[in-house]
Amino acid sequence: MTELATDPTLTAIDRCDRCGAQAYLRVFLRSGGELLFCAHHAAAHREKLNEVASRIQDETARLSQQ
């Protein structure tokens, strides 16, 4: 049986819902759905995101590896 990844890696196709830059953070909302953020907007809104998220997929560390 093939197992699907639950959180596929964010790619250049995934864009920030705030500004359209490449997304490095996926926020799964408690109310359902998800939001995508670039590293800048993720940092700017981190406190509020932690309040509304059921979980967060954070790939911002990839920026320092490039």
Image (spheres, grey):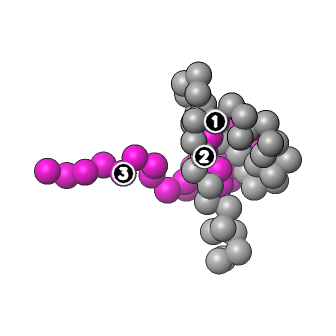
Where residue 18 sits in the image (x, y, percent)?
78, 38
Where residue 34 sits in the image (x, y, percent)?
58, 33
Nearest the eye: 37 or 32: 32
Tag on residue 6?
none
Where residue 59 sits in the image (x, y, percent)?
61, 59
Task: Determine the residue positioned at 54% across, 24% down.
Answer: 32
Location of residue 27 with respect to 43 vertically, above or below? above
Q: Are marks 1 and 3 in contact (CB under 8 Å)?
A: no
The answer to whether residue 24 is magenta is yes
Task: Determine the residue positioned at 71% across, 40% down.
Answer: 50
Q: Secondary structure at mark 2?
A: strand
Q: According to the image, label 2 marks what residue? A: 56
In the picture as drawn, the residue positioned furthest to the right comes out as 44
In the picture as drawn, the residue positioned furthest to the front comes out as 51
Nearest the eye: 1 or 15: 1
Task: Determine the residue positioned at 57% across, 50% down.
Answer: 57
Task: Return the disc, 1 or 3, that comes first in the chain's sequence.
Answer: 3
Taking 47 as reference, is 62 left or right?
left
Q: Are marks 2 and 1 in contact (CB under 8 Å)?
A: yes
Q: According to the image, label 1 marks what residue? A: 53
Amino acid tagged 3: Ala
Amino acid tagged 2: Ile
Q: According to the image, label 3 marks what residue? A: 5
Q: Characterize the local packing of mark 3: few (<14), some (14-19) or many (20 or more) Cα atoms within 10 angstroms.
A: few
The answer to whether residue 46 is magenta is no
Q: Are marks 2 and 3 in contact (CB under 8 Å)?
A: no
Q: Characterize the local packing of mark 2: few (<14), some (14-19) or many (20 or more) Cα atoms within 10 angstroms.
A: some
Amino acid tagged 1: Ala
Cα–Cα span, label 1 and label 3: 20 Å
Query: Which span of residues is magenta-colored?
Result: 1-27
Q: Main secondary structure of the magenta part?
A: loop
Nearest the eye: 2 or 31: 31
